[in-house]
Amino acid sequence: MNRKRIALMIFSQSMGGAEGVVVEILKHIDCNQFDVFLITNDEIKSFFYAYLKNERIYSIGRIFSFSNNMLINKVIYKLCMYANINIQKILLDKKLRKLANFIQMNRIRLIHSHLELDLYMLSKVKRYLKNQEKIVFTMHSSLSLADEDIQFCTLNKNILIDALKEYDYYTSACQFFIKILKNHVTIQNKYEIIENGIDLKRINILLQNPKQRKTEIVKMVYLGGERYLKGPDILLEALNILVHQYQIKNIHLNILRDLSAKSIVVKLARQYHIEQFISYAGYVAFPGHLEYIHNSDIFILPSRTEGIANSLMEAVGLEKPIVATDVGGTGEIVIDGQNGLLSTTDPIQLATKLKHFITNKELRTSLSQNNKEIKLRFDWNTIIRKYEKMYLKGKNNGF
């Protein structure tokens, strides 16, 4: 069989949602139809060794850390900021020719990019190779293109828009990002929605084990740590209202991810006198966080901005009732009153929604059942067929 040669491309400092999507594509793609390569950077390349042979992985080297010494890295970054030098852009431009040679040598004709820096570099490669390749970009974030955006991007808005215009096709897990993209790029019918998937096999193994239940305490879980975009201060203020205004004290909140010594989360917990209702789990390596979701009664996503959070999809898979802020693409997955409750970013309204769940076990059970009924739609084995269909369309029809 004449397998189609494609490459996935992602540059990042560490593993997260978009990186996880790349892993899942590598794990599930039909190797009888596709020869798959990966283009990445030194900082994360080792994460992919379990899914792809070394000779299929091309790294452009380090682009986020220039030394094993953290102090040296900080000094370099500060000097570049002071001199208004974009060090990442300079590094990528210097590595362009070698990457183009790798693509040509391996006869790769379709490349799928995922994040900001690889978006930029792949657009440059396409120009350099005079449009021989078809390139696809998946919007995993808003790329600071929305007027009210509070996300930080390394490259400026005009550079990103120019890069996006070079692409042949676009995907996103939600309509929210596509709407933002349409405000800057003419994409016509050159896009489709491909949801983020979940590993139902792993999740179903967890569901076979009953939750740890020793008391009538309602357990809640929040995975965002102290990241401002994830709304930890909104959540802590809502918890304060629950405890001191509504006098609801049969609750406990697990907070995942490492917290700094001066964390706003710890500071607010002390200020509001709600420390006894909170546990700090710290960093939990994948897939350990799934245990925390499974052992909770309510999954909370109080973000200021979102696309479609992977953890949200996992909460659906684990059949959890969800309380989330109605931002970004969250409302495309969580339907208020059907499989979760939606709130604004106002802590008072978030507290009211949480109270509604905490005091109504029947409602939690009902919405949990609704998530059980919809979760099959997000199985990675289903989602990957959509990616494969897109890759074949690009190869055979030039989009």
Image (tube, rainbow, N blue to C red):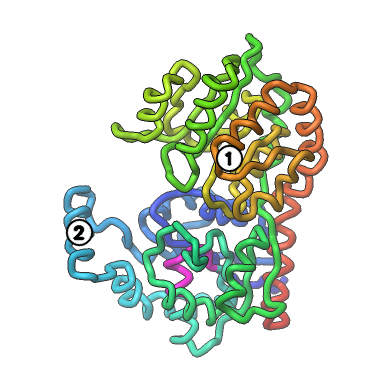
Q: Is any part of residue 179 visible from this angle?
A: yes
Residue 300 image position (x, y, % from top left): 59, 35
Q: What's the distance in space between the residues labelled 2 and 1, CA to CA?
A: 34 Å
Question: Residue 189 bears which disc, if any?
Answer: none
Relative side of 390 to 87, left or right:
right
Q: Can you identify the residue that label 1 sits on?
A: 301
Question: Residue 78 bears which disc, if any?
Answer: 2
What segment is highlighted magenta in the picture?
113-122
**Amino acid type of the residue that numbered disc 2 sits on in the rendered structure:** Lys
- Within 10 Å of disc 2 (Cα), the crowding (few <14, some 14-19, many 20+) is few
Relative side of 40 to 389, left or right:
left
Q: Which mark is first along the chain, 1 or 2?
A: 2
Residue drawn at (59%, 42%), measured in percent from left and top? 311
Nearest the viewer among 387 and 137 is 137
Residue drawn at (39%, 71%), measured in percent from left and top? 156
**Extreme residue toward the bottom, this view:** 130
Relative to 230, say whether 217 is above or below: above
Residue 129 image position (x, y, % from top left): 47, 86
Relative to 220, say whether 233 is above or below: below
Q: Is the stretch drawn in magenta largely helix, strand or loop?
A: helix
Relative side of 107 to 213, left or right:
left
